[in-house]
């Protein structure tokens, strides 16, 4: 099969992704093999390629927003059958024994493994995923539309929950890429007032088109105080700005697996009056199941831009240069 691998992590201009030929993978016990129909392109893939996240194994195939058809079963598989459409996501495995797993917080498991980091992902013609961590996909979502929901959607949804947006509240979204534009749709459908702050003019236009009340530059301020905010851009300098924009009692959730350094916070202006600053770490499977049901019910549809698998390196370069609006998705060619 054809597959892209992270050959030598470094700036995207140094071509860290290389296409190779590999034998088709074989599923082990409890695993299914998918013939990949679509794989979303996530900023985490870029962090892996550029070395912001240190590689955990050599020449790993990135990609963790995988939609595919089951075409081979490992021993003991009983959830999915041949031909079924399945989603493979970022969270690949947990220990099931630690205090986090035993209390419904498996996203914090110290032994968690991740697709496209600890094991090969979906920038390939085939991918193997554990059936216990895979998702059945709603029929209402086609392959390309469903792919970004498997990380951008699920992790973004967890970030929205961590932000504790009250019913009908005022939400600020900083950065407006694949995850943010899905979260905005969920919040708007649930009655929130959404303000978007992002450096991309095209993204600001999309935000208004999706129903945001305002869309301004990332270094600006929203037109009213916020009850909650989520930062999706991996820029630590946005954290004090977002904290300053919060009303008393507001919460900022920082989404993303990598963030540049956060400047020193001013206590009186940015933390006082019971404001909260929280991080977001991956997701639980319960988050994923809940979000996929909600996305289907609320008719959440990411703006997708499909690209041939053979152009994955070019797509990551476009992502690095902020030339992608919405979500890019790789499809077989």
Image: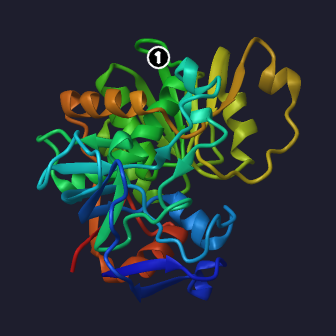
Q: 285 or 324, which lies in front?
A: 285
Left or right side of 163 for 291:
left
Tell me residue 102's x, y (percent). 56, 21
Q: Residue at x 60, y 22 (%)?
A: 225
Which secondary structure, mark 1? loop
Q: Residue at x 67, y 69 (%)?
A: 51
Tell me residue 180's x, y (percent). 45, 44
Q: Is residue 182 above or below residue 321?
A: above
Badge 1 is on which residue?
Answer: 169
Q: Is residue 246 above or below residue 15?
A: above
Left or right side of 67 for 16:
right
How many numbered marks are there? 1
Q: 247 or 78, which lies in front?
A: 78
Q: Quadrant of the N terminus?
A: bottom left
Q: Quadrant of the C terminus?
A: bottom left
Is there any visible trace of residue 212 in the rendered image?
Answer: no
Q: Residue at x 42, y 87 (%)?
A: 20
């Amino acid at each position: 099969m054809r597959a892209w691998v992270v050959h030598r992590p470094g700036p995207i201009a140094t071509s860290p992704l290389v296409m190779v030929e590999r034998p088709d993978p074989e599923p082990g016990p409890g695993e299914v093999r998918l013939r990949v129909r679509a794989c979303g392109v996530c900023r985490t893939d870029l962090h892996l390629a550029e070395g912001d996240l240190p590689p955990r194994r050599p020449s790993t195939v990135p990609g963790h927003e995988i939609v595919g058809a089951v075409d081979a079963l490992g021993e003991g598989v009983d959830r999915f059958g041949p031909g079924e459409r399945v989603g493979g996501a970022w969270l690949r495995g947990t220990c099931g024994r630690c205090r986090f797993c035993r209390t419904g917080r498996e996203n914090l498991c110290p032994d968690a493994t991740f697709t496209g980091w600890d094991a090969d992902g979906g920038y390939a013609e085939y991918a193997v995923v554990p059936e216990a961590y895979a998702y059945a996909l709603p029929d209402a979502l086609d392959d390309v539309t469903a792919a970004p929901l498997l990380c951008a959607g699920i992790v973004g949804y967890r970030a929205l929950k961590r932000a504790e947006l009250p019913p009908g509240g005022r939400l600020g979204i900083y950065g407006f890429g694949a995850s943010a534009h899905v979260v905005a749709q969920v919040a708007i459908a649930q009655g929130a007032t959404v303000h978007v702050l992002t450096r991309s003019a095209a993204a600001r236009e999309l935000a208004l088109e999706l129903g945001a009340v305002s869309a301004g530059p990332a270094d600006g301020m929203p037109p009213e105080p916020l009850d909650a905010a989520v930062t999706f851009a991996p820029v630590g300098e946005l954290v004090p700005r977002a904290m300053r924009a919060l009303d008393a009692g507001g919460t900022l959730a920082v989404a993303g697996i990598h963030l540049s350094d956060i400047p020193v916070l001013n206590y009186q202006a940015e933390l006082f009056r019971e404001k909260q600053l929280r991080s977001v770490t991956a997701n639980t499977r319960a988050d994923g199941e809940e979000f996929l049901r909600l996305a289907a019910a609320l008719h959440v549809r990411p703006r997708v831009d499909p690209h041939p698998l053979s152009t994955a390196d070019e797509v990551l370069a476009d992502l690095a240069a902020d030339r992608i609006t919405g979500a890019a998705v790789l499809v077989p060619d």
